[in-house]
Amino acid sequence: MKAQTLKQQAGEYAAQFVESGMVIGLGTGSTAIFATRRIARRIHGGELRDVIAIPTSLATEADARELGIPLSTLERHPRIDLTIDGADEVDPDFNLIKGGGGALLREKIVAQATERLIIVVDASKLSQQLGANWAVPVEVFPFGWHSQAGFLRDLGAGVVLRKSGADPFQTDQGNIILDCDFGSIADPAGLSQSLKSRAGIAEHGLFIGLARDVIVAGTDGIRHLRK
C-alpha cells in the first residue's frame, strides 16, 4: 500500500475525534493535512459546528483558510482541546521527533497548550529508539549559528544546515534549522534538557511526554495506541 494512502487513512481517522464547540490545533505536514481536509468536510457538511482552529504554521493557515475552517490565535484561545499533528519518528513511550517540515517551534507551542495531542503516522515512523531513523531538527537564531553548530557537534551530533535550494531554509520565525544526527538517543529527555540550556537555540524537535494518542496506519489497518 502506498505511503500516501496510509497517511490519508491515519489523518482521516483522527479527524473523527473533533467535536462541535472545540478549539483545535491543526498540524503541519503531509499526514496532518488529510486530517485538516476531513475536518473541513465535516464542518461544511454540518456535522461539526462552532469549531475554532489554531494553525501550527503559515502553510497550514493558508490551507485552512482555503478550506474555510474558522481560525483564531492562542492569544484569544490559550487552551486547545485537541490537536492533530504528524511526526517523523515515534518511540514506544510516545516521545517524538518532529520538525521535518520546519514548523517545530509553533508545533511545540501548540502542543504544550493542548489538552489532547493526537499524532498521526504511517507505520514506517515507529521506532524502538528516537534518532535511529531521523535526525533531530534544531531551530537556531541566525546570529552566531556556527557557535550553536559547534555546541551540537560537541554533544555528538552530525550537523547539517537545512537548505532550500542554494539558500538556508528559513522558518516562519525567520530562523534556520540544523538537522542533527545523534544516532539512537538513549536519553531523549536528557538531550532535550541539554538543548534547552543553550542560548541561541530557539527550539528543538524532541517532543517529550506530550502525545496522548498515536494513530498508526499500516498494511494491516489502523491501530489506535493510547497512553
Image: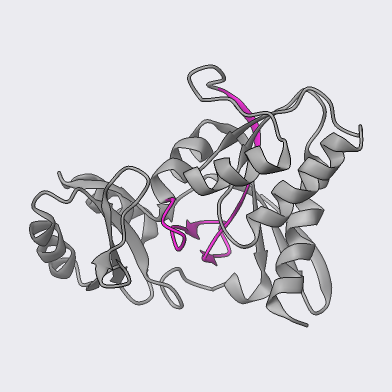
62 or 176: which is nearer to us? 62
| Quadrant of the image occupied by residue 178 | bottom left
| Residue 95 at x, y percent in the picture | 51, 56
Left or right: residue 170 compared with residue 45: left
Q: How many marks?
A: 0
Please tell me whether residue 56 belongs to the stretch shown in magenta.
no
Quadrant occupied by the N terminus: bottom right
Residue beneath the point at 53% across and 44% down:
210
Q: Is residue 83 visible?
A: no
| Quadrant of the image occupied by residue 221 | bottom right
Left or right: residue 223 compared with residue 149: right
What segment carries the magenta color?
Answer: 79-103
| Residue 227 at x, y percent in the picture | 66, 49
| Residue 110 at x, y percent in the picture | 51, 36
Residue beneath the point at 57% across and 46% down:
60
| Quadrant of the image occupied by residue 42 | top right
Q: How is the image coloured?
A: one colour
